[in-house]
Amino acid sequence: MNRLKALLSSLAPSWRKVWAVCRKELAGYFSAPVAYIVAAVFLLISGYFFSVVLAFSREASMRYLFHNMAVTLLLLAPMLTMRLIAEERKMGTYELLMTSPLRISELVAGKFLGAALLFLSILAVTLEYPLLLAVFGDPDWGPLLTGYLGFILLGFAFISVGMFASSLTDNQIVATVIAFGILLFMWIIGWASDLMGGPVGMLVRGLSIFDRFDSFSKGVLDTGDVVFYLSVIGTFFFLTARSLDWRRW
């Protein structure tokens, strides 16, 4: 038992080191214009859709807004993650990171956490939408809460995919294109299920990252959907770590 505890302790990341990497990433984000541009574009588009959807539907609901925000995030998330690792190679600091006392898991976790906190800070601005609905209407808080939960999981999945793409190249534009291509494939794969039908079609639809999000926007909290997003995050986290480990040698 003591040996098992020692093994787990050696494998577990040091959260002090993870937080140090996270702070470095946040400082890098806020010292460059990309984060401000992405935040401004996302908030402007989501605000526009909120006004339009509310004007046409006359419903105190954000279901359709969540879908529009998801599509917007599909386009913007690769821009948030393109610099995570690709910039380290471009600036010549990648070798320093690989020879530092940091474990790869700590490096990946810190970079993911930095991008995730930036994403959450941008999303926090949209909390004014449900507040406005509460002031001028009587919204159903269940779909609002599950919608935000689903959107956070979706955003984290996007970040994990973008981080993996950034680990494959030292060119930020290439990283953006790779991330967008992977995310677009994970979206349109659900369309193929309509052509296949049967059990195979159901299986393919279950792999669609956007079809899974639909349940959250309807107010349905399905454990399977939560596990799916956590699996996507864990899978691309693992692939990023393996990519960095392979490039180390």
Image: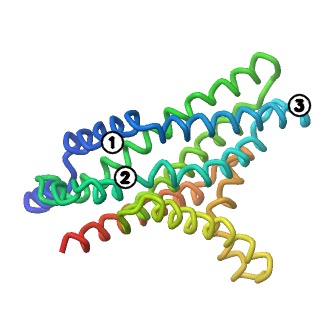
Q: Quadrant of residue 22?
A: top left
**Element marked by disc 2:** loop
Answer few, some or many: residues within 10 Å of disc 2's Cα (few below 14, many 20 plus, some between 14 and 19). Answer: many
- Nearer to us of marks 1 and 3 is 1
What's the residue at 37%, 34% (across, down)?
31
Residue tagged 1:
25
The CA span between labels 2 and 3 is 39 Å
Direction top: furthest residue: 135
Using residue 159 as the reference point, say whether residue 219 is left or right of it: right
Using residue 107 as the reference point, say whether residue 128 is left or right of it: right
Between discs 1 and 3, the one toward the N terminus: 1
User: Which amino acid type is marked by label 1?
Assistant: Glu
User: Which amino acid type is marked by label 2?
Assistant: Leu
Between discs 1 and 2, the one toward the N terminus: 1
Quarter holding the N terminus is: bottom left
**Element marked by disc 1:** helix
Between discs 2 and 3, the one toward the N terminus: 3
Evaluate if marks 2 and 3 touch, with contact meaning CB atoms under 8 Å apart: no
Using residue 50 as the reference point, say whether residue 221 is left or right of it: left
**Element marked by disc 3:** helix
Evaluate if marks 1 and 2 touch, with contact meaning CB atoms under 8 Å apart: yes
Tell me residue 107's x, y (percent).
Answer: 26, 53
Using residue 167 as the reference point, say whether residue 156 is left or right of it: right
Q: Quadrant of residue 27?
A: top left
Residue tagged 3:
55
What's the residue at 64%, 69% (across, down)?
206
- Nearer to us of marks 2 and 3 is 2
Residue tagged 2:
84
The CA span between labels 1 and 2 is 8 Å
Q: Nearer the viewer, residue 77 or 89?
A: 89
The CA span between labels 1 and 3 is 39 Å
